[in-house]
Image (cartoon, helix red, strand yellow):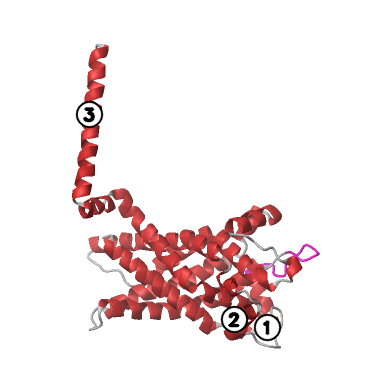
Amino acid sequence: MPPSRVVEDANGQSEAVLSKAESAVKAATENPKQATSSFLHTPFMRAALPFVNGGLAGMTATTVIQPIDMIKVRLQLAGEGVKTGPRATPISVVKDILVSGKARDLYTGLSAGLLRQAVYTTARLGIFDTFMKGLTASAERKGNKIGFKERAGAGLAAGGLAAMAGNPADLALIRMQSDGLKPVSQRENYKSVIDALVRISKNEGVTRLWAGCYPTVVRAMALNFGQLAFFSEAKNQLKGTSLSSRTQTLTASAIAGFFASFFSLPFDFVKTRLQKQTKLPDGTLPYKGMFDCFKQVTKDEGLMRFYRGFSTYYVRIAPHAMVTLIVADYLGFITK
C-alpha cells in the first residue's frame, strides 16, 4: 500500500474517532442524566458499584460515630488485669478527655477509621452484595427463593474476607486511640494512620499489622451475621406490613444493630486487647493469642468483662449500621 494511502487511512480513522468523541460530549451536554445512566450501566461499573457504595456508606457512618468508638475502646482497656476497683463508665471516660483539655481526642484515629472503612466496608458490603446477587440468580433458575441460611452464609463469608484485608488499618486505629492512656513519656504520638502503619511495620515487623487477626475475623463474621443477615431478613419480613419503606429500613437496621452487638462484642473486646498490646521489657507479650486472652480475662476480670460497655457498643454499632445500611440503600437506589 502506498505511504500516501496509509496516511489518508490514518487521518480518516482519526477524524472518525474525533467525530464520535464530539458526538458523545455533545450528547452528554444535552442530556447529562442519560449520559450518567449509560456510564453507570457499563459492565465494569455494575460490578464496582456495590464496593464503591459500601465504602462511601461506611466512611460516612464512621465520621458520625467516631467519638463513640473512641469511648468504647477506652472502656475496653480500662482496668486491664484488675477484677475489682473503680469501674470506668462512658461519662467518666468523656469527662477525663474533656478535663485534659483535649476534646479533639474524641476524633483521634479518624484517618485510620476512614481507611479501615475504605478497605473493610468497601469489601464487606461489596462482597455481600455480589454473593447475594449470585445466590438470588441461582435460586431463581431453580424456581426457589433464598432464605435466612443463604443470607447468613453470605454475611459470614463477606465479613471474614473483608476483615483480613482491613486488619492493618484496624490495628492502627486501636493504637492511635489507646495512645493517650500511656504515660506521656511512652506515647507514640502518631501523626496519621500512614505514620502509624509505617512506624509499626518498621519497629515491630510487617506481620505485626495482622496482630489480632483471628478475633478480628471472627468478630467480623459474628457482626456481619448479626448485621447483614438480620437486616436482610428483617426487611424481608417487614415488606408485607403497613410501614413505609424508610421506616422499614430504620426498624430493620435497629434490629440488625442489636444482634450484631450481641454476637460480636466478646470478640471485639479480645481484638482490642490484642491489638493494643506491645512487648514487655522481657520481650514477651501479655497475651499469647485469642484463646489465651479469653482465658486470662475470664480468670482475672470475670466473664462479664467481655460485655462491659454493651450499651456504648450498641450505641456505636446500631447507628453505624443504620447510617451505613441506609446510605448504601440510598446509593444503591440512585445508581440502579
On the question of residue 260 being in view, the answer is: no
Examine the rendered structure and indicate whether residue 64 appears above or below residue 56.
below
Question: Magenta residues?
Answer: 279-290
Element assignment for label 3: helix
Q: Choose mark 1 or mark 3, whichever is in front.
A: 3
Q: Amino acid at mark 3?
A: Glu
Considering only order in the chain, which callout, 1 or 2, is on the residue closer to the N terminus? 2
Element assignment for label 1: helix
Marker disc for residue 255: none
**Left or right: where does residue 55 sit relative to residue 133?**
right
- Let me know if residue 281 is in the magenta part: yes
Distance in Å between CA atoms under marks 2 and 1? 23 Å
**Left or right: where does residue 194 sit relative to residue 189?**
left
Numbered label tally: 3
On the question of residue 175 being in view, the answer is: yes
Relative image position of residue 295 (x, y in whole percent): 67, 76
Marker disc for residue 94: 2
Q: Residues within 10 Å of mark 3 (few under 14, many from 20)?
A: few
Q: Amino acid at mark 1?
A: Glu
Examine the rendered structure and indicate whether residue 28 appears above or below residue 121.
above
Disc 1 target residue: 301
Q: Decide: marks 2, 1 in contact (CB < 8 A)? A: no
Disc 3 target residue: 15
The secondary structure that dominates the magenta segment is loop
Q: Foreground residue, 101 or 63?
A: 101
Q: Amino acid at mark 2?
A: Val
